[in-house]
Amino acid sequence: MISATERISENMHIIANEPSLAFYRLQEHVRKALPPMVEKRVEINKLNQELQGHCYDLEYAIGAVNNMQAASSHLEHIQKLIKDSIFMKQQIAFITKNKKESVSVYKRLSAHITLDLSDIPEALRETASRVESILNTTSTAQPVPAPPPDVKKEKH
């Protein structure tokens, strides 16, 4: 009987301690497994947020590319205007270059031609003065022309 009572006592002890042993084993497992799982969950949430940010960036970039494709006609028009303006600028530069060359030719020519009045003979000076005096006398000696007949006279 002693052995039977010992066995019964042993079984009672096992049955009484079984739940606490199971809870101990569960607690031990949770203590070991939970921190790495929490870290992985935090890491997954962080990666999920980064992935959503990249998706938003990608959608924004796709929208921008689509808008650029829609603006291609405007950009082609701008390109045509730029080409036209470059051509006009070249024409203006060519014209101003030709004007400068023609003016500079005259300047170069006038720099070589010097007029010294002492070289002119006395007869030419006298002729010039006579022509000048004739012109002065004819301009002062002419009567003032009458107004044309179609001009109406104002009454005072």
Image: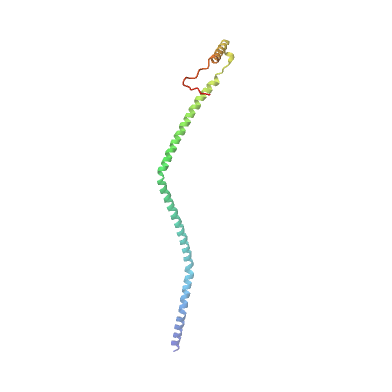
Q: Is residue 155 above or below residue 41?
A: above
* Image position of 108 with respect to 133: above or below: below
Question: Which residue is most to the top?
Answer: 123
User: Colour scheme of this structure image?
Assistant: rainbow
- Percent across and percent down for residue 81 are 43, 38
Q: Nearer the viewer, residue 96 or 32?
A: 96
Say which quarter of the image contains residue 18.
Answer: bottom left
Residue shown at the point (44%, 52%) measured from the top left: 60
Residue 89 location in percent, x, y? 47, 33
In the rendered image, residue 98, in percent from the top left (x then y), is placed at 48, 27
Q: Nearer the viewer, residue 89 or 11?
A: 89
At 45% from the left and 81% from the top, the residue drawn is 15
Image coords of residue 72 (percent x, y)? 40, 44
**Along the horizontal axis of the image, is 14 left or right of 141?**
left
Out of 130 and 85, give the one closest to the viewer. Answer: 130
Please name the residue shown 47% across and 31% down the image. 92
